[in-house]
């Protein structure tokens, strides 16, 4: 059985600690790492020793059944995607009420997944005739309208900047615009999904930019660049990056939104274990 991030598995499948606590807990993205239905993917994550999962869409999954399975394994869910790609949230003519209603539905859905108190919002693809600033302003306005719902449920939106190489013609790239949008919204319930893969592809300078944006980091995801496989397969020194994330006081699991190289999940888990060990 592979070791994962300082964790081992006991005979019952429960997590045990071999003499130390893990440096960097990881939430594995079950959409990218595994195959099968929701529960089958949770089981695969549990067998590799991951303490948490993250997922993309939630409406196509049996969250109640999956949530119970997570509890049985002593696992949590960190976040899911509440609003994905499209040309709606960034369209000034798209009804605000429809967005707010979907955010409330996502808030309700989190209660079915242990530990889940946040969800991702994607800003949207370019709309012909609108500037990036106009589209970003539309996103800001809709998120402001959702603030009473987020406060009511104590849930956090994590707005995700993309990168122009893997997601051309998108309206939000890099940390500067993301931070500016969060400042405009000015709420503890709206932060950034600080995806290190996208940040590396967009702007680089990962450690300094993490420091710059620390106030607005609501969640951290990672993958190596440029092929989006696990750490140890590309150009990023993730041991140093993980160490910096911990120095900033970040305590949530980091989201492994990466594709195991050659589809080998066990080998990818071993590489994560090595990165964690080297970040000590």
Image (tube, rainbow, N blue to C red):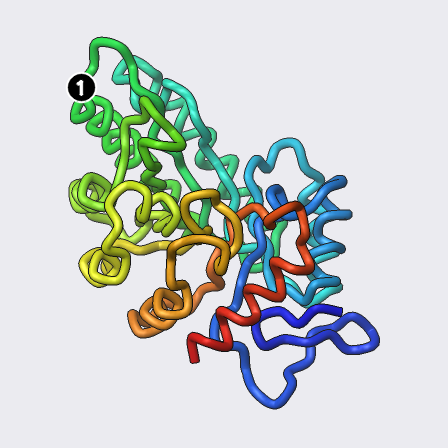
* Residue 267 visible in this rendered orientation of the protein: yes
Q: Residue 49: x, y in percent?
A: 68, 67
When the figure is inspected, residue 65 is found, relative to residue 275, above or below; the finding is: above
Choose top left, top right, bottom left or bottom right for residue 236. Answer: bottom left
Q: Residue at x 54, y 82 (%)?
A: 21
Q: Is residue 209 left or right of residue 67?
A: left
Q: Is residue 138 left or right of residue 269?
A: left
Q: Residue at x 30, y 23 (%)?
A: 90
> Is label 1 in a helix, a strand or a loop?
loop
Q: Quadrant of the C terminus?
A: bottom left
When the figure is inspected, residue 78 is found, relative to residue 129, above or below; the finding is: below
Q: Residue at x 30, y 29 (%)?
A: 142
Q: Quadrant of the N terminus?
A: bottom right
Q: Is residue 187 left or right of residue 152?
A: left
Q: Residue at x 38, y 29 (%)?
A: 167
Residue for badge 1: 131
* Residue 96 visible in this rendered orientation of the protein: no
Q: Residue 248: x, y in percent?
A: 29, 70
User: What is the residue that sits farthest to the top in this orientation?
Assistant: 129
């Amino acid at each position: 059985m592979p070791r994962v991030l300082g964790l081992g598995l006991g005979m019952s499948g429960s997590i045990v600690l071999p003499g130390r606590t893990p440096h960097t807990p990881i939430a594995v993205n079950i959409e990218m790492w595994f195959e099968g239905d929701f529960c089958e993917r949770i089981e695969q994550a549990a067998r590799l020793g991951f303490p948490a999962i993250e997922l993309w869409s939630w409406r196509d999954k049996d969250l109640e059944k999956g949530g119970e399975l997570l509890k049985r394994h002593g696992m949590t869910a960190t976040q899911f995607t509440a609003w994905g790609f499209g040309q709606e949230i960034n369209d000034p003519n798209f009804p605000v009420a429809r967005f707010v209603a979907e955010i409330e539905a996502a808030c309700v859905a989190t209660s079915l997944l242990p530990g889940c108190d946040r969800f991702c919002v994607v800003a949207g693809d370019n709309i012909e005739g609108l500037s990036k600033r106009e589209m970003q302003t539309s996103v800001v306005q809709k998120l402001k309208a959702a603030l009473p719902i987020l406060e009511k449920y104590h849930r956090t939106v994590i707005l995700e900047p993309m990168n122009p190489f893997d997601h051309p013609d998108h309206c939000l790239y890099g940390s500067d615009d993301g931070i500016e949008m969060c400042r405009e919204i000015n709420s503890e319930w709206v932060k950034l999904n600080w995806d290190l893969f996208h940040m590396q592809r967009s702007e680089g300078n990962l450690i300094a930019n993490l420091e710059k944006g620390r106030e607005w980091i609501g969640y951290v995801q990672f993958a190596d660049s440029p092929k989006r496989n696990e750490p140890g397969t590309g150009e990023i020194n993730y041991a140093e990056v993980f160490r910096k994330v911990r120095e900033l006081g970040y305590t949530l699991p980091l989201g492994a939104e990466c594709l195991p190289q050659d589809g080998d999940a066990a080998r990818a888990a071993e590489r994560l274990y090595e990165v964690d060990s080297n970040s000590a």
